[in-house]
Amino acid sequence: MQEVTDQLNIKGIRTKRGGKISINSVTRMLHNRKYIGEYKYRDIVKPGGIPAIVPEDLFDKVQERMVSNKKAPAKHKAEDEYLLTTKLFCGKCQCLMVGESGTSQMKKKVHRYYKCVSVKKHQGCDKKTVRKEWIEDLAIAFIRTIVFDDDLVSMLCETATRVQNQENTTLPLLKKQYNDTLKSIDNLLNAIQQGILTPSTKQRMEDLEKQKTELSIQIIKEEMTKPIISAEEIEAYFNRLRKLNFKKIEHRRRLINTFINKIVLYDDGRIYFGCNYKDCSKEMTFAELEEANVFSSDISALGAPKYRIESFDLVRYFIL
């Protein structure tokens, strides 16, 4: 929220009264249902009463994220951010693991780690705590095996257009109807120029113009709801991800929120990575992770993965 606020102020955007944008301003905007076309007057609420400028599914996702952020326990502690809050789970009891910190008595050094909620509340689980840096580095390293998979990126670029066309059948139909309407208008104009006039000519022209306008609006809405992403844009997106600083907090946050949905940490040497696209989700052992070279003293030195992730769901994820 603070990042959004800062960016708006940097760009010189102001409130309707000329003041600077605040977090409260952004919060009100994100909750404003007028953006999805909902008109309200006193106790009367009318969906679709005004033009919508934000897709309803996107609006709903924002509300879910804001509720999740509000309920997230121990997301910020000791001047640091726990990036796996609401994503890291105990492999023994399936409870969330939340951020904790403590200071050693001898060296007065602050230690940060994740702790099972069940252990924290003394509810029977004996899961050991894990160091914050270790598990977050591991998540970033796993993400790198996706981002630097050349075969995966190549497959995405080749199939993106085809998958989008297969999924969006409404837009091609609307565009065909729009083109047919334009042809009908041209034919009617040609007939008028040749002196062919009937009492219904004017009404027919008005109907076609109205139909043209309505189709144009429907096409714009459909394109806003399901924007077409080209293969070049997907390739450029991955290239930008590869150039991120994998040690910088805002870049690490972006990568984790983009790719990781759930991580389950077991005590028997297993770890499950649940991604936002199912075919990329993977359970691995620490031995497999070490063999794939994700355990590195310098994460930035990580090479390309030794396995290939095939996923048409990845295409669908980036499109939607």
Image: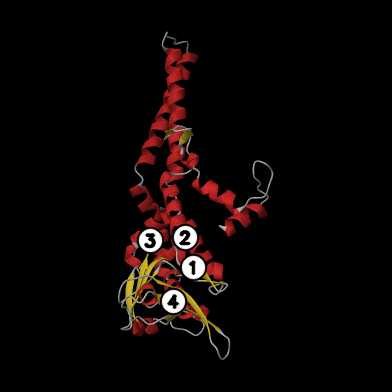
Three-letter amino acid code of the residue under disc 4? Tyr
Q: Residues within 10 Å of mark 3 (few under 14, many from 20)?
A: many
x, y (%) of residue 52? 47, 38
Q: CA distance from mark 3 to mark 1?
A: 28 Å
The disc, 2 or 1, on the residue closer to the chain's N-terminal end is 2
Q: CA distance from mark 2 to mark 3?
A: 25 Å
Image point 45% across, 66% down: which residue? 73
| Furthest-front residue in this view | 122
The disc, 4 or 1, on the residue closer to the chain's N-terminal end is 1
**Is residue 229 visible to us here?**
no
Q: Is residue 276 above or below residue 127?
A: above
**Residue placed under numbered mark 4 in the picture:** 114
| Furthest-bottom residue in this view | 106
x, y (%) of residue 306? 38, 78
Q: CA distance from mark 4 to mark 3?
A: 29 Å
Q: Residues within 10 Å of mark 4 (few under 14, many from 20)?
A: many
The disc, 3 or 1, on the residue closer to the chain's N-terminal end is 1
The disc, 4 or 2, on the residue closer to the chain's N-terminal end is 2
The reply to whether discs 2 and 1 touch (Cβ–Cβ < 8 Å) is yes
- Residue 19 is tagged as none
Query: Please, what secondary structure does the residue beneath circle 4 have?
Result: strand
**Residue placed under numbered mark 1 in the picture:** 75
**Residue placed under numbered mark 3 in the picture:** 314
Q: Nearer the viewer, residue 309 or 5?
A: 5
Rendered image quadrant of residue 93: bottom left
State the quadrant of the N terminus: bottom right
Query: Please, what secondary structure does the residue beneath circle 3 have?
Result: helix
Image point 44% across, 76% down: which residue? 114
